[in-house]
Image (cartoon, helix red, strand yellow):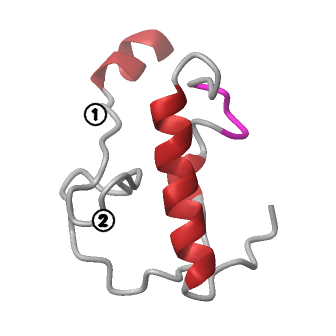
Amino acid sequence: KLREAALRLPPRSVSSRTPGMLMEWLQDYEECCPGFRHQSPIYGLFPAGLYDAIYEPQWASAAKVLVDRRIKYGGGSTGW
């Protein structure tokens, strides 16, 4: 059942509004709070390991853009 559910999840996407950034939502919304503290969009990279920075570096790069942007706007205190 878990594999079936995982196959129904939407694919990861990269933002066109903020080029190179891993998208948090299904639609490419304008961020109202770019420094928001949570980092849930990168959960698949870490800690879940659903994709790998070595074998899928484009997703690691997109996650880095997201994290760097959050930090730039004051969201560096995440508890991770």
Tell me which residue sits at (51%, 72%) in the image. Answer: 69
Considering depth in this image, is 19 or 52 the residue closer to the camera? Answer: 19
Q: Residues within 10 Å of mark 2 (few under 14, many from 20)?
A: some
Q: Quadrant of residue 29?
A: bottom left
Q: In the picture provided, is 6 more to the left or to the right than 28?
A: right
Relative to 41, does residue 37 appear above or below in the rendering?
below
Relative to 26, does residue 35 appear above or below in the rendering?
below
Image location (x, y in percent) of residue 39: 60, 61
Secondary structure beneath dot 1 equals loop
Magenta: main secondary structure equals: loop
Q: Quadrant of the C terminus?
A: bottom right
Q: Quadrant of the N terminus?
A: top left
Tell me which residue sits at (18%, 56%) in the image. Answer: 27
Magenta residues, start to end: 46-50
Q: Earlier in the sequence, mark 1 or mark 2?
A: 1
Foreground mark, 1 or 2? 2
Image location (x, y in percent) of residue 26: 23, 50
Tell me which residue sits at (61%, 36%) in the image. Answer: 45
The label number, if any, that marks residue 10 in the structure image: 1
Relative to 80, does residue 61 appear above or below in the rendering?
above
Q: Amino acid at mark 2?
A: Thr
Q: Quadrant of residue 40?
A: bottom right
Discs 1, 2 touching: Cβ within 8 Å: no
The label number, if any, that marks residue 60 in the structure image: none
Relative to 57, does residue 14 appear above or below in the rendering?
below
Q: Which residue is mark 2?
A: 18
Q: In the picture provided, is 59 more to the left or to the right than 51?
A: left
Image location (x, y in percent) of residue 25: 30, 56
Q: Amino acid at mark 1?
A: Pro
Answer whether residue 26 is magenta in the image: no
